[in-house]
Amino acid sequence: IHVYTAREVFGTVGSRVTLSCSFWSSEWISEDISITWHFQAEGSRDSISIFHFAKGQPYIDDVGSFKERMEWVGNPRRKDGSIVIHRLEPTDNGTFTCDVKNPP
């Protein structure tokens, strides 16, 4: 499986930004496909899981700093695992990683 994201995404504090994640798989998209977004804050060594899609359902982080600010806009059938972050904050600066698994 190949996963594609933008190298850099810029946003303004208070606005929203779409984090695009598209993928290509030589296999058909299985019902067991999972998509996980991780966030590593600038200057931090640790990354945290902020979003997970599995068994056909999105599971949005409901405790961390992205609580109630994230929206699932992806569609695995269209090979899209994108999310939107609303009301950007200065602490949102960091590295976001999209991880897609399509087990046969």
Image (cartoon, helix red, strand yellow):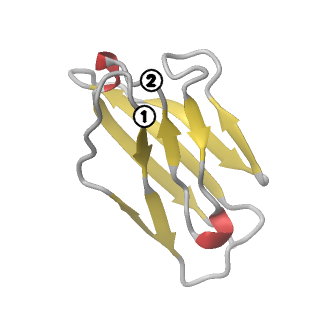
Residue at far front of view: 15
Classify mark 1: helix, strand or loop.
Answer: loop
Residue 7 is marked as none
**Tag 2: residue type?**
Arg
Q: Are marks 2 and 1 in contact (CB under 8 Å)?
A: yes
Residue closer to the observer: 59 or 75: 75
17 to the left or right of 26: left
Question: Which residue shows up at 61% across the image and 15% down it?
Answer: 63
Residue 4 appears left or right of 44? right
Q: Position of residue 52 (x, y in %)?
A: 62, 41
The total number of labels drawn is: 2
Task: Indicate which disc residue 16 carries.
Answer: 1
Secondary structure of the residue carrying tag 2 is: loop
Q: Position of residue 7 (x, y in %)?
A: 24, 53
Between 90 and 50, the one lying in front of the other is 90
Find the distance from the CA under tag 2 to the CA under tag 1.
6 Å
Q: Quadrant of residue 77?
A: bottom right
Across and down, in percent, residue 48 comes to 46, 28
